[in-house]
Amino acid sequence: TDTAHGGAGDDDIAVFRIEEDGASLAHVSNLPAGGHWPRDIFVSDDLLIVTTERSDCVTVFRMSGDRMSSVLLQTLTDLPAPIAVLCV
């Protein structure tokens, strides 16, 4: 199982693997956030959705199976300071 964490100052997303013991993490990769100041992220299967507060956009990526790279699928722009992803 993988988890991700946004690095606002670095403008990237750090991807971690949850180790088998369930108590520790292993760094897998850093992926670009697609904008400045990633504020919130949502991961669903191989999709990574990132709000970038200071770029006024939300980016959607498809992550590779090994989580070492990603491909930009879509950028939603003109969204003033998005701070959260809400999936219903």
Image: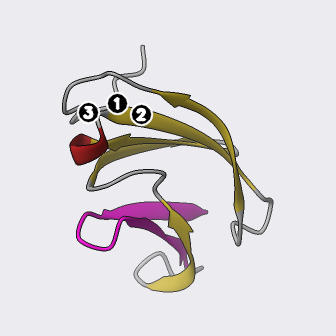
Q: Secondary structure at mark 2?
A: strand
Circles 3, 1 touching at the beta carbon (< 8 Å): yes
Q: CA distance from mark 1 to mark 2?
A: 9 Å
What is the spatial separation of the Cα atoms under label 2 and label 3, in whole angstroms? 9 Å
Q: Are marks 1 and 2 in contact (CB under 8 Å)?
A: yes
**Residue at image location 43% in from the left, 84% down from the top:** 24
Answer with mark 2 or mark 3, whichever residue precedes in sequence: 2
Depicted 22 relative to depicted 67: above or below: below
Residue 58's tag is 2
Is 52 left or right of 15, judged from the image as shown? left
Q: Is residue 3 magenta?
A: yes
Q: Which mark is residue 85?
A: 1
Q: Secondary structure at mark 1?
A: loop
The secondary structure that dominates the magenta segment is strand
- Which color mode does the image show? secondary structure
Residue shown at the point (31%, 55%) measured from the top left: 36
Q: Which residue is mark 3?
A: 84
Mark 1 and mark 2 lie on one chain; the one further toward the N terminus is 2
17 to the left or right of 36: right
Q: CA distance from mark 3 to mark 1?
A: 4 Å
**Amino acid at pointer 2:** Val
